[in-house]
Image (cartoon, helix red, strand yellow):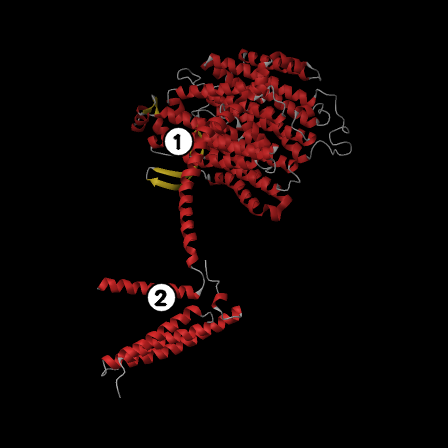
Amino acid sequence: MPNYAYIALIPLLPLAAFVVLGLFGRKYFRGWSGVIGTLAVLISTGLSLWAAYRYFFVDGIVGEGHRQIVALKYVWLSFSPGLSIDMSIILDPISVMMIVVVSFVSLMVHIFSLGYMKGEVRFGTYYAFLGLFTFSMLGLVLSGNIFEIYIFWELVGCSSFLLIGYYFDRPTAVAAAKKAFIVTRFADLGFLIGILILSFHAESLDFRTLIQRLNAPSSQLAGITTASFMGISLLSWGLVLVFIGGAGKSALFPLHIWLPDAMEGPTPVSALIHAATMVVAGVYLVARLYPVYMFSGGTVLQVVLYVGAFSALLAAIIACTQTDIKRVLAYSTMSQIGYMMLALGTFHPAGEAATMGYTASLFHLFTHAFFKALLFLCAGVVIHKVHSNEMRDMGGLRKLLPLTHGCFLIACLAIAGIPPFSGFFSKEDILLSAWHANKFVYGVGLFTSGLTAFYMFRLYFSVFWRRPVRGAGDGHDGPGHHHGEAPFTMKLPLVILALGALLAGFVPFSRLVTYDGLPQETHGIGVFAIAPVALALIGIFIARYLYFKESDRPDRVAAAWGGLYKWAYHKFYIDEVYTFITKKIIFNLIGRPAAWIDRNIVDGLMNFLATVTAGISGAIKGLQSGKVQDYALYFFAGIAGLTVLFIYLYT
Amino acid sequence: MSQIPLSHILVVSTALFFIGMYGLFTRRNMITMLMSVELILNSVNINFVAFNKYLYPDKLEGVFFTLFIIAIAAAEAAVAIAIIINLYRNFHSIDVEDAGEMKF
């Protein structure tokens, strides 16, 4: 067996960067902290690419497919001989694919931030947080134990919180960080309960054992399927709860409300955490436990399917109306993640393409990471230039930012699913598996893919065309302030990611990452591709018609849609519903009575005791006058009293 | 030599005790208060000697006790005067009412 100890270095190097920069970054490294953080991630990326090569092409192959390898195992907390929390690293197709994606995108963001965050006061802290995030995310995908994944899950949430609130002097950023933290924490509660249910019945926390025991006829399985709560078996409950945890992290309806607000963080952070890596953790989690989901009879996967489809559609509709460039991208992220979940849900027990959705989902995760990170980084360049997030402040930027323009176009074509860009292939797989599973969901997916093309090109035309070309001199900053498009450190990641977005679709994914490790036969792209591509083209042309030149057409269309437009513009009032539920119902019915009891009964008891004590002491403190003769008088009076007492007592 | 009755001596010592007590409570000067305490102690001494003489003439415990008390009174006077001197250094006065800080 080859030595896999070096895998541990992949997450540990960013951790080392975090510790070093967190402790000494501000004092000793200053400008160098970015380089240190980037170097650590660069080595991690190199190692993960090497690990992927070794795994997929050399060591991991067993016969036809790929096996699961436990690279490292360290028993960390042992409850009983069969039940322990281990710190282990497992290599299987999805974890290897994920470490490549995570470390690669993280590297791109590290490089990009060298230019983007230059001159920030808390530059070192920023890189420390990025290191912490990269460490936790890599740890998450490599976890071999369900509790270990939970630990990293929380760490990821924590670093996301820190980075959203990076500009902590802005109240909106603070509120967004809190919101993200609270909403995901709420979902994590479900995850934790799900973990407890599953592991209690499987009597193991180890993924492999847990899956084995819940996947084949065994006493543990019999226990969990016969026990039921409210008419639904505990197995389903556990899986739904785990899915709720994933839905919270992955911003699926109805727990998506934190993601658009999370755009308050620095833009490269949005690219890394809220587009490419952390938000797909939910997809990864479901994929990790996929055998159990499948075995539960597919009912839970129906939930996954519909939640994913609904989120995809809802977010796409909202994205069509938003005017903040990052929010459009945020809703598009949510929509794409809904797509991935939808693909995971397209399992049908019979049929030769039963687990095709699994591969399609992870394929989309893979390609999405490239083009969405690219979109965010391009948005970062634009925001850097224009100093505004609002689309109406932009327009006509194509000559000013030629490279960004090209990259953005590539990413838009990729996400819209135009061949031969990467998004086309993955979306095709998803739609195909949806077609096999559920025609209604297929329709939703098709419509969403048209909408996706529309809102992405709405963004593209609004930012880069719409207005007359801006020259180098009449930019936002006034003449003489421009020094080219962007520094080299910001351009390099754009180019690399654009290549990724262009070529990632050609990775023979269905041969590498599959449910059972065996390669699937590739489905030829045929007639089936006509409908989505045609819809995407229609979407693009509508967007071109409306937004290519400045006109009142968009307003007229918006007016024609009337109520629906207004609803979508206000994000279907979901935030307001939450505010209503929390402020009006929970606060009034639970919070206030609880606060009243706390303030009046619990505090009141203590205050009463204190008041009584104070009153008594106030009444008698005059006795202690500080005069020696008073004390002598009490003394003699006491003796006289005792004397009288004894005289009467003894006679 | 006619015997002086015991009650006469007890009257003297009681008078002495209450004079001392009166002085202790009314004087504000610490030296005077110390003197009053000495009066109280001496009234006790007189009692000891008198009871010893009249009730147990062949024993000496009362006299010994008196000697002890005299020695202790001397030591106590030394301690008391040391306290008074320290008090004077801090308050520039030996009036007890000026040293009323140790209170609530």
- Residue type pointed to by label 2: Phe
The quadrant of the image that shows the C terminus of chain A is: bottom left
For this view, does A635 lie left or right of residue A254?
left
Residue A358 in picture, x, y percent from top left: 46, 22
- Residue type pointed to by label 1: Ile
For this view, does B22 lie left or right of residue A310?
left
Q: Say which of A293 and A158 sits in front.
A: A158
Residue A516 in picture, x, y percent from top left: 42, 25
Q: Which residue is mark 1?
A: A193
- Disc nearest the viewer among 1 and 2: 2
Confirm whether residue A320 shows in the render: yes
- Classify mark 1: residues with Cα within 10 Å, few (<14), some (14-19) or many (20+): some
Residue A455 in picture, x, y percent from top left: 61, 19
Q: Residue furthest bottom?
A: B1
Q: Residue at x 61, y 20 (%)?
A: A456
**Chain at numbered mark 2:** A
Confirm whether residue A419 shows in the render: no
Q: Residue at x 42, y 44 (%)?
A: A607
Q: Which residue is mark 2?
A: A636
Quadrant of residue A624 in the image? bottom left
Question: Which comes sooner in the sequence, label 1 or label 2?
Answer: 1
Quadrant of residue A376 in the image? top right
For this view, does A134 lie left or right of residue A468?
left
Q: Say which of B23 and A175 sits in front.
A: B23
Decide: marks 1, 2 in contact (CB < 8 A)?
A: no
**Chain at numbered mark 1:** A
